[in-house]
Amino acid sequence: MAKHISSKPHKPKKHAAEKPSRAADQLRIALVGMGTVGTSVAKILCQSSDGPLRLTHILDRDDSKRQTSWVPKNIRWAESFDEVLASDVDVVVELIGGLEPAADWIRKALLAAKSVVTANKMVIAESGADLQELAREMGQRIEFGASVAGGIPVIIGIQEGLAGDRLHEIAGILNGTCNYVLTRMEANGVGFQEALKEAQKLGFAEADPSADVEGFDARAKLVILTQAGLRTQVRTEQILCRPISLIEAVDFMYAHDLDCTIRQISLARKEASNGMFLFAAVQPALIPLSSLMAHVERNKNMVVVSGEFSEQTVFSGYGAGGDPTAVAVVSDLYSIARGAGAPQPGLSAGLEVPETVSGEFTVPHYLRFVVKDRPGIIAAVGTVLSRFGISIDAVFQKPGYGHTALPFVMTLETCSSAVLNRALEEIASLDFHVQAPLCLPILRV
């Protein structure tokens, strides 16, 4: 029964853990970056200034932010990050995003004996283990619960709530933009570009949505989850990424005929057989309508964690947006306030290095072709597949399409995606294609 929870740098000399100095037993906080998430964090902290958290400094490159009327007059607007480092703040909250200068500023904050809270998935995916080791050596903390799935407490849930289990698989819908686009295509029958423009208009997608639709955003999050949950060392470039931009409205029609839908699925599976192997990918996939993930709508996220003893644990909710992410940031601040100064074991401690990292899964597959219709097309495709030892399960063709651009679908019995890709290279060279074939795995998640 699934449990459902809703929403190496230079190494200095080691320092003994010390509690940060605090006025009136409050944690003094500097907020770096006052964008959508930073503004929500500032509002929460300003409204709870009599608690254990006290916002004392704000750094933002936009000078107009200084005119924000609800920010108390006693909060100092810093002129530079060096001023933040020289201050008496206990914790730096980094919310500027991107790899640089964010990674450099986080290192400098830790070296200045200040703890760090960040929502920066790119930095944590690239350097999280090293930064946690640096924090440990400096007797400080670095918390990044907001870096994956925003307001959903998946990191702390995995690291603390499931610490007694041996986890072997993490699957999820980790990007709200992609989920919004795909669910709008499914519900309204609109094309990818129209659904994307709607997401941009509503603020769910950036002006440049490539990090989302290409899978890079979800891949960074999957790296963090793989390290935190599967205790496996993996780099972003090792994980296969495929875009959602090739999905068309007709694919949802065929998917429904198969009692499935289409979602961007992030999947990491750890297997031990004469060594440890990691299978990991971020890609659009068919999933059964019976799956919980099939019912994740709009910009929500879901993470399903499978373990040896706990079976499945499900985390779901709004994974993006200013307020949900700000809640995760402030929750990390409370965690530091409760145990401030306690050094953590490095994220790299105990991580296994897999013999191989592969995005090739042995599963059933969905193939969609758009062709200039003529006799013998299915036979030609079947001949190539047969030569590679791949069996066709079913063929679907909806009426009402012209013969100059006719879509039809094949489903394949379980086969290796590596072998299938070689067969598709040969099939793609045949002369009846109007566009390149679309291949999607059918995943039981």
Image: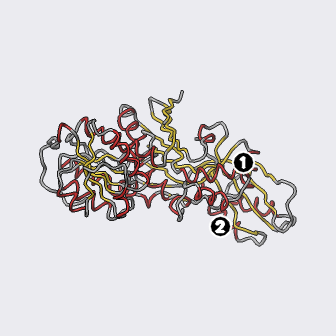
Query: Looking at the rendered structure, which numbered label has been put on residue 51?
Result: none
Residue 186 rendering spot, x and y as whole percentages: 70, 49
Residue 275 visible to an observer of this rendering = no
Answer left or right for 396 relative to 33.
right
Along the line of sight, which residue is nearer the eye, 308 or 259?
Answer: 259
Residue 38 visible to an observer of this rendering = yes
- Ranked by sequence position, the earlier of labels 2 and 1 is 1
Which residue carries the number 2 mark?
425
Spatial CA span between label 2 and label 1: 24 Å
Specify few, some or many for label 2: CA neighbours under 10 Å numbering under 14, 14-19, or 20 or more: few
Answer left or right for 189 relative to 442.
right
Along the line of sight, which residue is nearer the eye, 413 or 166?
Answer: 166
Residue 57 rendering spot, x and y as whole percentages: 26, 53
Residue 273 rendering spot, x and y as whole percentages: 45, 44
Which residue carries the number 1 mark?
255
Residue 321 rendering spot, x and y as whole percentages: 48, 49
Q: Nearer the viewer, mark 2 or mark 1?
A: 1
Amino acid type of the residue that numbered disc 2 sits on in the rendered structure: Glu
Answer left or right for 385 relative to 5.
right
Q: Secondary structure at mark 1?
A: helix
Along the line of sight, which residue is nearer the eye, 251 or 395?
Answer: 251
Residue at 27% across / 60% down in the picture? 105
